[in-house]
Image (cartoon, rainbow, N blue to C red):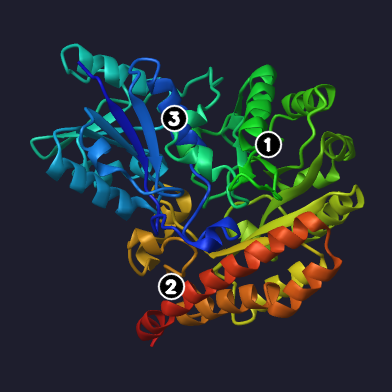
Amino acid sequence: MIRKIRFIEPSNPPYRRALRNFFTNGKFIRNPSVGTLMVTTIAQRLVEDTLMYSESISEIVWDDVLDADIVFIGIFTFNAQRGYELAQYIKKNSSAVVVMGGMHASLNYPEAVRYCDYILLGEADESVLDFINSLNQNGDIDFPGVAYLNNSEIVHTGERTPPQNIDCIPNYDLLYNYKKMASYNTVWAQVHASRGCPYFCDYCAIIRHLGRGIRTRSVDNVIKDIEQTIAYHDRRFLGIVPRANKIVWLTDDNFFADRKWAIAVLNAIIDRNIKAPFSTQARYEIGFDDEMLVLLKKAGFVEIVFGIEFLENESFDQFNKRCSYKEVVKAIRNTQAHGLEVRGLFILGADNHTVGAGRKIADFVIEHNIKGVLIQSMYFTPSTPAYDANKHRLIHEDWKKYDGNVVHYPSSISPYELQKELIFALGKIYSFRRLLRALVVEKWLYKLIFTGEYFWQNSMRANYKRELSYLKQISD
């Protein structure tokens, strides 16, 4: 009988205490995975003694974990190697059944299955219950959505239909140490309201993992989640200082993919008089939807994160992203005209990128008053079209370096020079001069956010610089 279950979210690097954690996300602290916490919440329906550890916000209490009957570990590509290390440690030091899941384990299960007993493929909302019930009965895994080794041969039990009912409000009390960490400005209130994407970008793993169709939670369920999440994060640091950053982050990859549903959610936020600054991610087309932009502003949204990626039409074409530079600029300007700020996600390393590509992004960000950025070298998640088409160009598969570093041989620039472009772009956007400017001219919220990002991005630049000697060596 299964009496105790533990979930683990690895982090690269793992959490450690530091004063900067209150101000700077991404060094020793990150936002925990809402997806893993949802599955933890679902699993507790069957096993009361269920708890999740996230190395994004805390150390693991090993005496507790090694006593569990099942340990689930959820991994993305950047933290896969850390996940494998944890799985091997648990298998060596306990009798727990070790199960891996998440995007990387699902899309690269022939690799991941060597480190654990089972892989839950795809979304585990339903399969986690089937798995627990199977172990409680005869132990036979005869339902779809699982991979495991049988005498060194990989067994794949078949594809599983994605869950259609995804109404689940994660229980943050099941996330170890989160009650304390929710007071930190770096830990944002998160709500994930929909899954999937209707588009075809070759580098995106969302379609492979969650499907092309859009599945949404019911409006009432989303609103209840938002209200509970806001209440949970309405805490004080050390019992004295109120949180300065109270942004609610709707973490959907494209919150507006189902337009009718998105409008219904926004109207419900307005009708319930929920007062909080919101942020979410979208494709550039939202910048042409005046009705939606008006609703966003009225509902309390302060910004939209645009997945811009490239600034050249040739790059959009290369990775099957239906977009154009001219449309992106128009969308940014119209969004800002409605009183909403814009943040940008960018990728370096397309075939046409040469020396100067980083400067081009930095100049674009500054010229168009984009409030913050995430710039990474081209990433390759196993099983995506971009990965399959470029496997022969990968420098290595050292997954812990798949966190923004250059990991492939570009066509028109060396890996070393591309890494320098990345470092330059972040240095220009997050310069000390621009920090001083932000502290003088920006609103209070963005004074705080830019300050935190200044320290974070400069720590990322330091990490990228450490890789330069190796990239220079393989570029010569």
**Amino acid type, residue under disc 1 in the picture:** Phe
Comparing 118 with 6, the one in front is 6
Disc marking residue 174: 3
Q: Can residue 335 be seen at all in this image of the molecule?
A: yes
Q: Determine whether, in the image, residue 248 is placed left or right of residue 11.
A: right
Q: Which residue is mark 1?
A: 255
Q: What x and y, as percent, mark residue 470?
A: 36, 80
Q: Which residue is mark 2?
A: 409
Local SS, label 2: loop
| Residue lying at the far top of the rendered structure | 137
- CA gap between label 2 and label 1 equals 34 Å
Q: Quadrant of the C terminus?
A: bottom left
Query: Label 1: few (<14), some or many (≥20) within 10 Å?
Result: many
- CB of mark 2 within 8 Å of CB of mark 1? no
Local SS, label 1: loop
Q: Determine whether, in the image, residue 147 is placed left or right of residue 43.
A: left
Q: What x and y, as percent, mark residue 246?
A: 70, 44
**Amino acid type, residue under disc 3 in the picture:** Leu
> For residue 375, which quarter of the picture?
bottom right
